[in-house]
Amino acid sequence: MKKLDLRTLFLTFALVATSAAAQAVQPAKETVGLRRTIEYLASDKLEGRRTGSKGANLAADYVEAQFKAAGLKPGVNGKAYKQEFPYVTHVEIGPANTFSATRGTSDLKMTDLEISPVGFSPNGKVGDAPLVFAGFGITAKDQKYDDYSRNGARLDVKGKVVVAFDGNQANDDPHSPFRRFDLRTKASIAKENGAAGLIVISREKNFADERLRKLSFDQTLGTAAVPTFVISRKGAVALLGLDAAGLDKLEADAIKGGGDVAATSTLSFNVDLVQKTVPAYNIIGVLQGNDPKLKDEAIVIGAHYDHLGRGGSGSLAPNSTEIHHGADDNASGTAAIIEMARNFAHLGKNARTLVFISFSGEEEGLYGSNWYVNHPTFPIAQTVAMINLDMVGRLNEGKLTIGGMGTASEWKALVEKYSKDHAGKPLFHLQLNDDGFGPSDHSSFYGKKIPVLFFFTGTHADYHKPSDTAEKINYDGEYEIVRFVERIVNALDANATRPTYEVAKSAPVARTAFNVSLGTVPNYAETSDGLHLDAVRDNSPAAKAGVKGGDIVIKLAGKEVRNISDYMFALGEMKAGETYEIVVRRGSETLTLKIVPVHAGGR
């Protein structure tokens, strides 16, 4: 499941519990297939299944082989099981990348500078730009704090390169009001002040340990607003004309809101970073329907198979490079849909067509499912429901969460009926959530107005850590969940009437570093032409303003929006209850609308 952090601000949901009597799940014996799949997918051989990696491709091959062995037909044009989509794995420094600096009349040696563009820097060229020091590079109007103001006067940074310390003056205190000022936000502030570039001074004594120089790339947030670099402390000493003690004093002064240096250096650079794109794959298998009419309708049953590789972005094990096995997240869901594919294919009685999809790219922003709903192999209009299983391997005390309950009027009766045994006793302690959006692949389908159900056994201490391993799976519990979901699919399939799509009540947005919410559901694919919206929550500020799913936000609160990073920067400057302009592109039209944010926790 995609991590619930700032990057997934717009896709988070809170669980709304409804009570049902708990009953211990009876141990099941037929768990061999589940165990075999989970143990393989979570093995060291697959190295955590990071999208685009060798391990992920091995996982894709495995799922394809299982679908084929079960008797499913290829879901891509009837010829292939793999649906390919592009995925950026990393960036590399290109041949045209250059950097030079002059202090006074002397050229500085590159060996002394130790400087590197960060992996999410945009490409760009600047010649002979002066340097300006700006503390930590932060402007926080709500805190009446501004590093771009000195002694009541604004710093002139137009066309210049800003130099600032990495981090913030609160030493990354998680409760600090400055915690939202990450490097992308600092780059946006620099751009807003007219700067041509930004250099941050590393906090690491040993530059080899600096995470920012590793050229990692996060597709979710996109590129920074201006060319952005990280420089070693040794390099900063050379660039600013200080000694080591002078740099330490400058940092101490910056922490107190002061600090100044008469930098005489000028810079010329050409940032040339090349994104390395590899193919990633959704695996699609189809079980053709048997009813002459209903076979033209489909039920999608899905689960993502990717995970976090050896950590990095999304990991909750800081700085770990160990294999993140992802047994529960989401080898468990993948094993479940393979088991269901075998069972339904063996029976061969389904009226509607069943489309089984194992998605990739979920952890980075629902890329695989988003690609599918925009490049469907079965018509979206004829897709009557989507069933998603994500983290279903840790059933504890019978607790099972089902999301999407408010997306079809039939769901509540269906779930209530089939969550009981023949004697009418509940099989699970259910926690029911109405919202159709959430941090997993069903959200992509709900954004296309398809009723969804999402099955989830909850987070745990091993979530997004290397310790999420196969021996911790409750196989008997997962077997019972598979049988339960099969009963729901059978009932849904047998009903000649498709489920009735409903606009679900939105769950409160989880607490974040932002004070306001607009109710948009972004597309997390990396772009530079604006923030593409998959959907808009019902009755939200965005909906009331007239914003629609499919719109492209190009300006918000007076700030240019190229991607989600720019959007989040603008959002951080907004206040609840005040009116702002939001400019969107809708087809060939450009619309300027009025929007009034609400406090985060509203819709």
Image (spheres, rainbow, N blue to C red):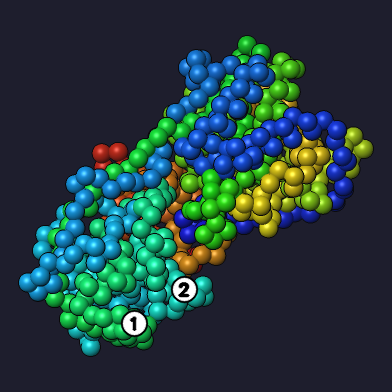
Q: Quadrant of residue 250?
A: bottom left
Looking at this view, name the residue that lies furthest to the left. 105
Residue at image point 56% right, 42% down: 47
Identity, as a three-letter code, of the amino acid under mark 2: Asp
Residue at image point 85% right, 33% down: 29
Looking at this view, name the residue that lies furthest to the bottom. 151
Q: Position of residue 105 (x, y in %)?
A: 7, 72
Residue at image point 24% right, 83% down: 260
Dot 1 lies on which element?
A: helix
Residue 524 drawn above or below residue 100: above
Packing grade of label 2 (10 A; few <14, some 14-19, many >=20) is some
Specify the label residue 172 is tagged with. Answer: 2
Identity, as a three-letter code, of the amino acid under mark 1: Asp
Residue placed most toward the observer, 445 or 222: 222
What count of labels does the image hold?
Answer: 2
Q: Position of residue 467 (x, y in %)?
A: 66, 52
Marks 2 and 1, the one that precedes in the sequence: 2
Q: Position of residue 86 (x, y in %)?
A: 40, 34
Residue placed most toward the observer, 102 or 65: 102
Residue under pointer 1: 248
Specify the label residue 75 is tagged with. Answer: none
